[in-house]
């Protein structure tokens, strides 16, 4: 089979996730592969040949959506002949692998029925699943282990390769899952040409453009406004922090279901002067460049891409202690991990009062972020794709 005819399918429950795969999809197309994408189709996906709309739903409880998406994926995988399927996100990964499992059984029945008369080439695509953080982890609620762990363990038997992005998930999969190979990659990769530091003059110009003063002490938190990201904890510390840091500004870049509740909390605590809700942004490099410290209070993270982007921009980081953040903040040269609100306040006050320490950490982080660069991710995934597509 000529390489030009080989086809690769990426799948995730949301089309927004395609931005993480875009460098890999671009590389595959440049090598001559046909690249397609399956998602809920809520936005345009770039660097592909075709986009298939599948009615994925994010919530594991949306049973009606899952059944419909499963039927749609079965139809797609029956009609199209893919050499490699690379699925992402819990819902997208489960439904895609279940659909392929069902289609493979159908193929086997055809083989048995037709025997030597079968003239059509039978396909069995290579299957890769990248987990961006298992929902079961040390300290996770019991319901997560009861619901997600058995499914992932069962599906591992029919998955060619499970890619993890942190060592906790990697070690668990290696120890507990059978049938699949397990590997680790340092995230989807940060574009260090896009996320980079700027000089003092440009930084001040960016601040002036956004209505910030040179003397403001700016914390930035990037991420969806939801309960897991835990912006609520950050806001609850602001009355105490504002007493210690009068020129404090907290930029919350993102949107989500918790925005109204967070806005109410800001008014209740009377910290409107300290908080800016920025909504969904496409100028994240510039926002990071004008900040002093990047923060995250996420309860659960697979890795913490926002922190790595901040590091590449030259910022120190202060983040909640979880498996993903531990993968990034490996020493106090990088930043501080906290477990309690009091520890968060202490870390922020320390960095506020020690600008030289902030600069040293920022310079170290610029170098450290290169370990998570998109070039590193592309090189590793390129080797993997070549291995699974060679002679397939």
Image (cartoon, helix red, strand yellow):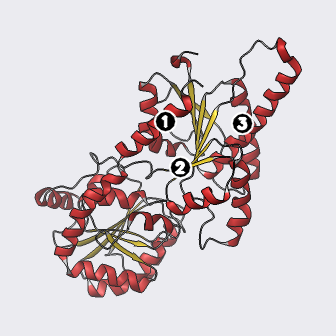
Q: Position of residue 389 (x, y in %)?
A: 55, 29
Nearer the observer, 287 or 329: 329
Q: Are marks 1 and 2 in contact (CB under 8 Å)?
A: no
Nearer the observer, 97 or 161: 161
Q: CA distance from mark 1 to mark 3?
A: 23 Å
User: Quarter holding the N terminus?
Assistant: top right
Q: Position of residue 249 (x, y in %)?
A: 29, 72
Q: Position of residue 363 (x, y in %)?
A: 21, 63
User: Quarter holding the C terminus?
Assistant: top right
**Disc 1 or disc 3, which is closer to the eye?**
3
Give the mark nearest the N terminus, 1 or 3.
1
Residue 293 vs residue 231: left or right?
Answer: left
Q: CA distance from mark 1 to mark 2?
A: 27 Å
Which secondary structure lies at badge 3?
helix
Instruction: Tell me if residue 170 comes above or below residue 214 in the rendering.
Output: above
Find residue 185 and name its label. none
Per the image, the residue denoted by label 2 is 183
Which secondary structure lies at badge 1?
loop
Give the mark nearest the N terminus, 1 or 2.
1
Find residue 45 and name its label. 1
Q: CA distance from mark 3 to mark 2?
A: 22 Å
Q: Can see residue 57?
A: no
Q: Position of residue 353 (x, y in %)?
A: 21, 82
Find residue 100 and name its label. 3
**Disc 3 or disc 2, which is closer to the eye?**
2
Instruction: Tell me if residue 251 comes above or below residue 199 in the rendering.
Output: below
Which secondary structure lies at badge 2?
strand
Residue drawn at point x = 71 percent, y = 17 percent: 121
Instruction: Tell me if residue 331 comes above or below residue 34 in the rendering.
Output: below
Residue drawn at point x = 44 percent, y = 48 percent: 188
């Amino acid at each position: 089979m000529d390489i030009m005819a080989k086809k690769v399918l990426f799948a995730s429950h949301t089309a927004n996730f395609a931005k993480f795969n875009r460098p890999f999809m671009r590389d595959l197309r440049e090598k001559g592969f046909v690249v397609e994408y399956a998602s809920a189709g809520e936005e345009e996906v770039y660097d592909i040949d075709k986009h298939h709309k599948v009615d994925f739903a994010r919530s594991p409880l949306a049973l009606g959506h899952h059944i419909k998406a499963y039927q749609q994926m079965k139809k797609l995988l029956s009609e199209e002949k893919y050499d490699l399927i690379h699925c992402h996100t819990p819902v997208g990964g489960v439904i895609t692998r279940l659909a392929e499992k069902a289609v493979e059984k159908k193929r086997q029945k055809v083989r048995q029925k037709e025997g030597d008369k079968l003239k059509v080439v039978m396909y069995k695509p290579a299957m890769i699943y990248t987990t961006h953080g298992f929902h079961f982890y040390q300290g996770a609620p019991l319901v997560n282990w009861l619901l997600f762990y058995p499914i992932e363990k069962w599906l591992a038997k029919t998955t060619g390769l499970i890619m993890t992005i942190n060592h906790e998930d990697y070690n668990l999969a290696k120890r507990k899952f059978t049938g699949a190979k397990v590997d680790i990659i340092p995230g989807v990769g940060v574009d260090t040409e896009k996320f980079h530091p700027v000089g003092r003059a440009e930084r001040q110009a960016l601040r002036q453009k956004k209505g910030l003063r040179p003397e403001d002490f700016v914390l930035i938190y990037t991420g969806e406004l939801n309960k897991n990201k835990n912006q609520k904890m950050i806001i609850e510390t602001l009355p105490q922090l504002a007493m210690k840091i009068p020129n404090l500004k907290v930029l919350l870049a993102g949107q989500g279901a918790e925005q109204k509740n967070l806005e109410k909390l800001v008014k209740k605590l009377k910290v409107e002067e300290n908080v800016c809700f920025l909504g969904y942004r496409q100028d994240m490099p510039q926002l990071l460049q004008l900040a002093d410290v990047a923060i995250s209070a996420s309860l659960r993270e697979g890795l913490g891409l926002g922190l790595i982007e901040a590091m590449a921009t030259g910022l120190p980081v202060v983040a909640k202690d979880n498996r993903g953040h531990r993968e990034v903040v490996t020493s106090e040269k990088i930043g501080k991990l906290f477990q309690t609100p009091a520890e968060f306040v202490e870390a922020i006050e320390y960095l506020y009062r020690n600008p030289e320490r902030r600069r040293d950490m920022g310079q170290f982080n610029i170098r450290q972020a290169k370990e998570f660069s998109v070039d590193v991710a592309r090189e590793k995934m390129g080797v993997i794709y070549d291995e699974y597509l060679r002679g397939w």
